[in-house]
Amino acid sequence: LLDRSCTLLFTTMRSSVLALLLFFLATIGNARSDYNYDMQSGGEISREQVIRNMERRKKQLETLLAETKKSIANHHSGVETLELEEKEKLEKRIEIINKKLERMEDVDEREIERMQRREQRRWERRRDREL
């Protein structure tokens, strides 16, 4: 029984890790394509690009939130067994993601301009490194 439980736990954890790894790889790919687009646009980061990046990040966070909630629901239903520490970590992640999503809803024009300036500086540093 213990051997079967360990095997089930390992299989469940492995699938969760693989899902998160695929999510992060997709995120990196999207970020790279956005930077390539920015570099081809002459280096000016537009307000629309900042908003598009923010919307993309919001979707990523919503996906991560749904996956995390699903893992906890699977734990409560007995499909996936989580250790107490891992369960607490996922519950904390839900709190953090919810706070981030709330802050993203309250973005005003001044904040968008600040993000645009930050992205412009980031792009310039990246361009200088590549030259």
Image (cartoon, grey):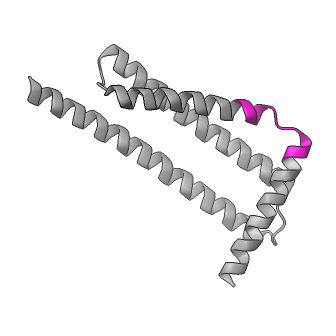
- Please give the name of the residue rendered at 60% of the width and 33% of the height, measured from the top-left corner: 97
Q: Name the dominant secondary structure of the magenta segment.
A: helix
Work out which quarter of the rendered image holds the N terminus and state it.
Answer: top left
Task: Reply above or below: 22 against 100.
Answer: below
The image shows residue 31 at horizontal and vertical percentages of 62, 57
Residue at position x 30%, y 21% in the image: 79
Q: How many marks?
A: 0
**Residue 82 placement (x, y as % from top left):** 32, 27
Residue nearer the viewer, 34 or 97: 97
Q: In which image quadrant can residue 46 be found? A: bottom right
**120 relative position to 13: left or right:** right
Point out residue 32 in the picture as x, y percentages from the top left corner: 61, 62
Q: Does 79 sit left or right of 52 as displayed? A: left
Q: In this view, does 114 lie above or below 76?
A: below
- Left or right: 88, with 111 as reference point: left
Is residue 106 magenta-colored?
yes
Q: Which residue occupies 79% across, 66% down? A: 121
Assess whether residue 116 is covered by the magenta stretch: no
Q: Residue at x 74, y 68 (%)?
A: 123
Outermost top residue: 77
Where's the C terminus, which quadrant? bottom right
The magenta-colored residue range is 102-111
Q: Is residue 81 above or below residue 108?
A: above
**Residue 88 spot, x, y in % from top left:** 43, 27
Instruction: Specify the farthest residue to the front.
Output: 85
For the view shown, which residue lies furthest in the right direction?
110
State which quadrant residue 109 falls in.
top right
Q: In this view, does 75 lie to the left or right of 124?
A: left
